[in-house]
Image (cartoon, helix red, strand yellow):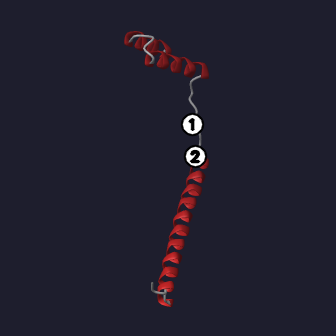
Amino acid sequence: MMAATGAEYAWVLILLWSLLALVVVGTSGVVLAKVLSSRHQAGAQQVRSAEPPSLDEAQHALRLRYAHGEISREDYLQGKVELED
């Protein structure tokens, strides 16, 4: 077996430091992206529906019943028209 020389250790250290630098830069980029994203979302105003909550609940219940196959397409469309009026 051959003993490792100082030059071989130097290359290993260079490789490890390079890997560490890449990890730090990558992690910093992810953290920065999340911070900027959260600031953008916090600054955006929440747009609320002009419809009363009971209407939203009724429309949601109608969509669920149609999705579960409890009502036909015609019944769904009729209920949708009635709720929009």
Quadrant in the picture for residue 49: top right
Determine the secondary structure under disc 1. loop
Between 59 and 18, the one nearer to me in the picture: 18
Quadrant containing the N terminus is bottom left
In percent of width and height, residue 25 lies at: 53, 68
Query: Which residue is labeled 1 in the image?
Result: 47
- Count neighbours of disc 2 (C-alpha within 10 A) and say few if under 14, some if 14 to 19, many if 20 or more: few
Residue drawn at point x = 55 percent, y = 53 percent: 37
In percent of width and height, residue 67 lies at: 44, 19
Query: Which residue is labeled 2 in the image?
Result: 44
What's under tag 2, amino acid-wise? Answer: Ala
Q: Residue furthest bottom?
A: 6
In percent of width and height, residue 69 lies at: 42, 14
Above or below 20: residue 80: above
Q: Residue furthest front?
A: 1
Determine the secondary structure under disc 2. loop
What's under tag 1, amino acid-wise? Answer: Val
Residue drawn at point x = 38 percent, y = 10 percent: 74
